[in-house]
Amino acid sequence: MAFEGTMTKEEIKTLQKASDYTDTKPGSQLPSSSNEHGMAIPGQSKSEAEQGTNEFIESKNNAYIESGDLKTFGEGGHAIMDKTSPSHENYQVWNGTNGLKNKVNGILHFVKELNLFRLNDDKVKQAAQDYKSNYDKVQTTRNQRADQQANDRVNNGSGMGGMEQYKEDKIIE
């Protein structure tokens, strides 16, 4: 929803796979990984969980800016989407899936996320807007950095379009 008409189907598929990976990679459902899902680690305050989630998103954004790896960006996007889910909002505590009580809570959590009766379409739309807004911000930074690097290469760091180096080379010849 966030990138329809903006990205190719392949790029969107990459983001979807990255989001799925963030949920299914080894250790992803451990309490220590809660911030990657917009949730709190047991014992963590709401503000600490929010900070941890924002740091996770920012680290993925920065990695994408440097590498252009859309998969990395999609991993951070997972947390952006999860933050708006009724199963996650307000940085609910995630105790993992060990033990019967946590397994049952995990199943209920998953069912709630399915939005079967479309009761949370407003939150889905908000998540899409937040994800797209983050992408636009990060892409702008990425483009500015690429422009600056290209400009630096042309200028050889001189600010003179490379003319100083050209003149030096001619004098040496």
Image: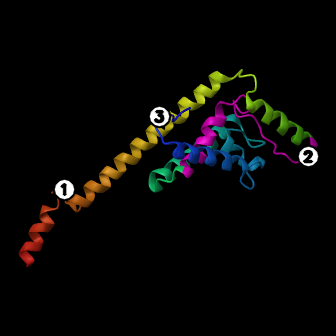
Callout 3 secondary element:
loop
The part of the image, by quadrant, that contains residue 88 is top right
Q: Alpha-carbon neighbours of circle 1 within 10 Å: few (<14), some, or many (≥20)?
A: few
Q: How far apart, in angstroms, are the residues tagged by discs 1 and 2?
A: 63 Å
Observer-nearest of 64 and 21: 21
The amino acid type of the residue labelled 2 equals: Gly
Identify the image quadrant of the C terminus.
Answer: bottom left
Residue 108 horizontal/vertical position (percent): 84, 33
Residue 55 visible within the image: no
Q: Residue 98, relative to residue 85: is it above or below?
A: below
Label 1 belongs to which residue? 159
Closer to the chain start, of discs 2 and 3, is 3
Q: Alpha-carbon neighbours of circle 2 within 10 Å: few (<14), some, or many (≥20)?
A: few
Q: In the displayed orientation, state which residue is furthest to the right.
A: 100
The part of the image, by quadrant, that contains residue 154 is bottom left
The part of the image, by quadrant, that contains residue 116 is top right
Observer-nearest of 18 and 93: 18
Label 3 belongs to which residue? 5
Identify the image quadrant of the N terminus.
Answer: top right
Horizontal relation, residue 5 to residue 171: left or right: right
The amino acid type of the residue labelled 3 equals: Gly
The amino acid type of the residue labelled 1 equals: Gly
- Which region shows up in magenta? 71-100
Q: Is residue 82 magenta?
A: yes
Horizontal relation, residue 108 to residue 127: left or right: right
The residue at the point 58 percent across, 26 percent down is: 126
Q: In the displayed orientation, state which residue is furthest to the bottom.
A: 173
The residue at the point 59 percent across, 31 percent down is: 127
Q: How far apart, in angstroms, are the residues tagged by discs 2 and 3?
A: 44 Å
Label 2 belongs to which residue? 99
The residue at the point 59 percent across, 26 percent down is: 125
